[in-house]
Image: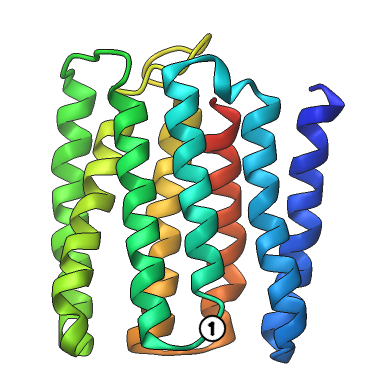
């Protein structure tokens, strides 16, 4: 792997570690440094992998930039910034969907199986969260739907110079969706560092996989 691609991966690991330390000690200033820096690393990885050279790569890059904006918006504790962050992530998921469909794919048995699995994932996730959501029920339901669509369409993705379906893309999409459960649990069900302890590494790992597919 070229150093231009390896460096963002390693730096993302370093900044994710710093972010976890900041979260565990509630060091606000360090969060504002480490989280944007870790997110910038997956954007830089996509650029190093040639994201600007194909429609797929461009849409992945757009999704990554939107997710970086969402990461920054989630740093404060306010509900308005949380909703804005959800909106940025939803737009990022939509960009990923466009990327995954950019190769003109056709439905396959594996896509149909993935779509059915994601319907169950969405239903059970909402059933778990619903009693805790209050005024967030509408936004969370919509967000859950776009996540399910994003993961389902990842089975159709045809990134440049990679087989289709791409295990790298599918793993990245699934990792992203599962990491969102940590965010939801922390926000609505049982707040605590344990949610970030596993959710953040999974999230950044998933984003790096999607960035590397560009």
The residue depicted at 51 percent of the width and 59 percent of the height is 69
Q: Nearer the viewer, residue 161 or 87?
A: 87
Q: Position of residue 137 (x, y in %)?
A: 16, 78
The residue depicted at 65 percent of the width and 30 percent of the height is 47
The residue depicted at 60 percent of the width and 49 percent of the height is 205
User: In the displayed image of the protein, which residue is found farthest to the top?
Assistant: 161
Dot 1 corresponds to which residue?
Answer: 76
Q: Position of residue 119 (x, y in %)?
A: 14, 50
The residue depicted at 74 percent of the width and 67 percent of the height is 34
Relative to 205, residue 168 above or below: above
Relative to 164, residue 48 above or below: below
**In screen coordinates, is 2 left or right of 99?**
right
Picture quadrant where residue 83 is located: bottom left
Pick the quarter of the image with the C terminus.
Answer: top right
Q: How many marks?
A: 1
Which class describes the residues within 10 Å of circle 1: few (<14), some (14-19), or many (20+)?
Answer: some
Q: Position of residue 105 (x, y in %)?
A: 24, 15
Color encoding of the figure: rainbow
**In screen coordinates, is 188 left or right of 114?**
right
Relative to 177, residue 100 above or below: above
Q: Position of residue 23 (x, y in %)?
A: 67, 82
Task: Indicate the secondary structure of the residue bearing disc 1.
Answer: loop
Pick the quarter of the image with the N terminus.
Answer: top right
């Amino acid at each position: 792997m070229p150093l231009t691609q390896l460096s963002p991966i390693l730096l993302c690991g370093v900044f994710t570690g710093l972010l976890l330390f900041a979260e565990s000690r509630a060091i606000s200033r360090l969060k504002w440094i480490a989280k944007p820096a870790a997110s910038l690393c997956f954007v830089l990885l996509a650029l190093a992998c040639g994201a600007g050279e194909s429609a797929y790569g461009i849409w992945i890059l757009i999704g990554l930039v939107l997710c970086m904006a969402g990461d920054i918006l989630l740093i404060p504790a306010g509900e308005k910034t949380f909703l804005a962050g959800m909106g940025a992530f939803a737009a990022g998921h939509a960009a990923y969907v466009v990327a995954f469909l950019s190769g003109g794919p056709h439905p396959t048995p594996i896509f149909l199986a993935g779509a059915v699995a994601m319907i169950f994932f969405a239903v059970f996730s909402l059933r778990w969260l619903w009693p805790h959501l209050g005024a967030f029920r509408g936004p969370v339901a919509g967000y859950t739907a776009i996540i399910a669509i994003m993961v389902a369409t990842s089975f159709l993705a045809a990134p440049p110079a990679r087989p289709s379906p791409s295990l790298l893309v599918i793993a990245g999409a699934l990792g992203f969706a599962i990491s969102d459960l940590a965010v939801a649990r922390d926000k609505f069900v049982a707040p605590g560092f344990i949610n970030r302890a596993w959710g953040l590494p999974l999230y950044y790992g998933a984003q790096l996989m999607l960035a590397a597919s560009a």
